[in-house]
Image: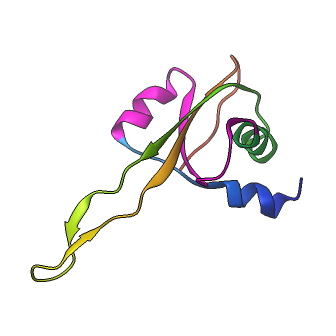
Amino acid sequence: MALGFLYSIIKAALVTEKSNRDIALGKYSFKVAKEANKIEIAKAIETIYKVKVKKVSTEIVKGKAKKIRWDQPGKTSSWKKAVVTLKKGYQIEIS
């Protein structure tokens, strides 16, 4: 797989309070492409970070209703989240 293709699957690492708590359990959260499946996500993480993936869980995070300006209704975009569990002895440095 080309490295550019892998980076189009993995868009960003999620750094939140909850994701930082899960790092102790070997779970890392990523924002991924909506059309990516679990196998593609696992291969991309293994290639980019040089680790072994044990499990991948995905979910679609729904967009929230927001006001754009004045009283115009709007909405944030929906996106896909992947929680990747690594095999024992592996870790990812996320800054």
Left or right for 79, reference 7: left
Q: In this view, does 86 lie to the left or right of 94?
A: right
Residue 4 appears left or right of 54:
right
**Please, which residue is most extreme toward the top here?**
88
Residue at screen point 50% across, 29% down: 23
Q: Position of residue 22 (x, y in %)?
A: 46, 27
Q: Give the range drawn in magenta.
A: 17-39
* Image coloring type: rainbow
Q: Does the magenta stretch include residue 20?
A: yes
Q: Choose top left, top right, bottom left or bottom right for residue 40.
A: top right
Q: Which residue lies furthest to the left in this view?
A: 71
Q: Quadrant of residue 45?
A: top right
Residue 42 lies in quadrant = top right
Where is residue 15? Give x, y as percent.
44, 46
Q: In this view, does 26 lie above or below 44?
A: above
Between residue 40 and residue 4, name the one nearer to us: 40
- Residue 44 versus residue 69 in the image, above or below: above
Q: How many tags in the picture?
A: 0
Instruction: Give the camera-side residue of 85 and 57.
Output: 57
* Residue at the image position 68 percent from the left and 36 percent from the top: 38
